[in-house]
Amino acid sequence: MAQATVTAPEEKTVNSAQSAWSAKDLAFTAMFAALIAVCSWISIPTAVPFTLQTFAIYCALECLGGKRGFFAVLVYILLGAAGVPVFAGFSGGLGVILGTTGGYIIGFLANAAVYWAFEKLPNHEKLWMRLTALILGTVLCYVFGTAWFMYVYTRDVEAVTLGQALAWCVTPFLGSNVLKLALAVGISDRLRKYVKF
């Protein structure tokens, strides 16, 4: 006599729990989304002032990994799009994202996506692989952000060349970005020794 195969309810529960996020995942994702917001408000008064926004994004990716880091960035952007003043200069709203610098904000997602994709590669935990992921993601962010800047500026103000756009939006911030990346990697490496993210 044939016997029916019964799937234990406990097995389904276990599989469902494994695919779901834990409370710790949600908490750390929210915490780093808040950290990105706070760092966006901090402006360093150098010859070319810059915020710590990208520093926090690098920290989120390094501490949380690609998946949770990606969603931390996404939550941050969605909060800003909803009007919460989480962007630089305590600004928020779709107007910022659709404005000249909005492409760089959306580009942060590309930065995180590259890091997440790199985690599927061999040796992704090696320092040189992590640095490569962060650098490539930053380059992609710059490419998308600059293209968006040129489109919006040309539409709303006047035609602008690629050289002008790079001189205004990219070149002045390269040095500070390298510094922020290096600090984020160093600090995150230290934090992971004491905190189980």
Image (cartoon, grey):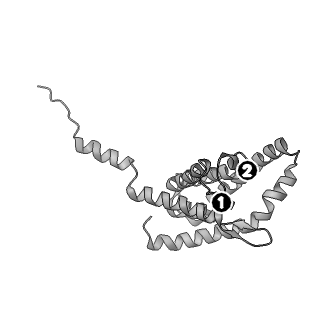
Q: Which residue is mark 1?
A: 90
Residue 28 seen by the camera: yes
Q: Position of residue 137 (x, y in %)?
A: 65, 55
What residue is at 63 percent from the left and 59 percent from the top?
134
**Which residue is nearer to you in this view: 81 or 143?**
81
Q: Position of residue 117 (x, y in %)?
A: 56, 50
What residue is at 76 percent from the left and 49 percent from the top?
100
**Mark 2: secondary structure:** helix
Q: Amino acid at mark 2?
A: Gly
Residue lying at the far left of the rendered structure: 1
Q: Amino acid at mark 1?
A: Phe
Q: Which residue is mark 2?
A: 145
Residue 118 sits above or below residue 173 on the image = above
Residue 78 sits above or below residue 133 on the image = above
Q: Position of residue 116 (x, y in %)?
A: 55, 52
The CA distance from mark 1 to mark 2 is 20 Å
In the picture, measured across the screen, residue 59 lies left or right of residue 50, that is: left
